[in-house]
Image (cartoon, rainbow, N blue to C red):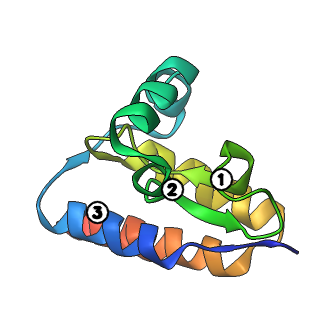
């Protein structure tokens, strides 16, 4: 399995949660709250791919570096961590046996819910 936990992204997410930059939405909201392709492209143009990758808990070193295919499991909208995104990615990570990502998402959700 090539997709692994992106530790820089996890650190970024935790820092955002500590600062209170969290959208406490419900599970099924992510499909409406997720950034569009245009939003993603605009963010990459403004901030670079390295910053874009910090918004994804999954990273695949076997994919071409600096491409959207090399990151997965987004958790926010480039401003805040979305609770609904973390719930969604935890479920998807479990479904595809990405245990390190699933555990990180569960821990992040616990941090969100305790704050």
- In terms of sequence position, does the residue under pointer 3 or pointer 1 come before the other? 1
The residue at 34%/64% (across/down) is: 13
The residue at 34%/38% (across/down) is: 25
Secondary-structure class at tag 2: helix
Which residue corresponds to mark 1?
72
In which image quadrant can residue 110 be found? bottom left
Which residue corresponds to mark 2?
53
Q: Position of residue 1 (x, y in %)?
A: 88, 75
Q: Position of residue 69 (x, y in %)?
A: 74, 47
Q: What is the crowding at mark 3: few (fewer than 14 residues within 10 Å), some, or many (at least 20)?
A: many
- In terms of sequence position, does the residue under pointer 1 or pointer 2 come before the other? 2
Image disc number at residue 42: none
Q: Where the C terminus falls, by quadrant?
A: bottom left
Q: CA distance from mark 1 to mark 2?
A: 9 Å
**Mark 3 or mark 1: which is in front?**
1
The residue at 50%/40% (across/down) is: 27
**Mark 3 or mark 2: which is in front?**
2
User: From the viewer's perspective, is 87 left or right of 5?
Assistant: left
For the residue pair 115 and 85, the one nearer the viewer reads as 85
Q: What is the crowding at mark 2: few (fewer than 14 residues within 10 Å), some, or many (at least 20)?
A: many
Asked whether the residues under the numbered discs 3 and 1 touch, taking CB atoms below 8 Å apart as contact, a structural biologist would say no
Secondary-structure class at tag 1: strand
Q: What is the crowding at mark 1: few (fewer than 14 residues within 10 Å), some, or many (at least 20)?
A: many
Q: Position of residue 11 (x, y in %)?
A: 35, 75
Q: CA distance from mark 3 to mark 1?
A: 20 Å
Q: Is residue 35 visible?
A: no
Secondary-structure class at tag 3: helix
- In terms of sequence position, does the residue under pointer 3 or pointer 2 come before the other? 2
Asked whether the residues under the numbered discs 1 and 2 touch, taking CB atoms below 8 Å apart as contact, a structural biologist would say no
In which image quadrant can residue 107 be found? bottom left
Image disc number at residue 112: 3
């Amino acid at each position: 399995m090539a997709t692994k936990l992106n530790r820089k992204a996890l650190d970024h997410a935790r820092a955002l949660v500590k600062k209170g930059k969290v959208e406490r939405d419900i599970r099924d909201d992510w499909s409406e709250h997720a950034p569009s392709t245009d939003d993603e492209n605009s963010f990459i143009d403004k901030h670079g791919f390295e910053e874009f990758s910090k918004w994804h808990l999954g990273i695949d070193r076997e994919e071409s570096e600096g491409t959207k295919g090399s990151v997965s499991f987004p958790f926010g909208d480039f401003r805040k961590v979305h609770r609904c995104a973390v719930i969604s990615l935890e479920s998807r990570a479990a479904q595809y046996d990405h245990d390190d990502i699933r555990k990180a998402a569960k821990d992040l959700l616990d941090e969100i819910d305790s704050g």
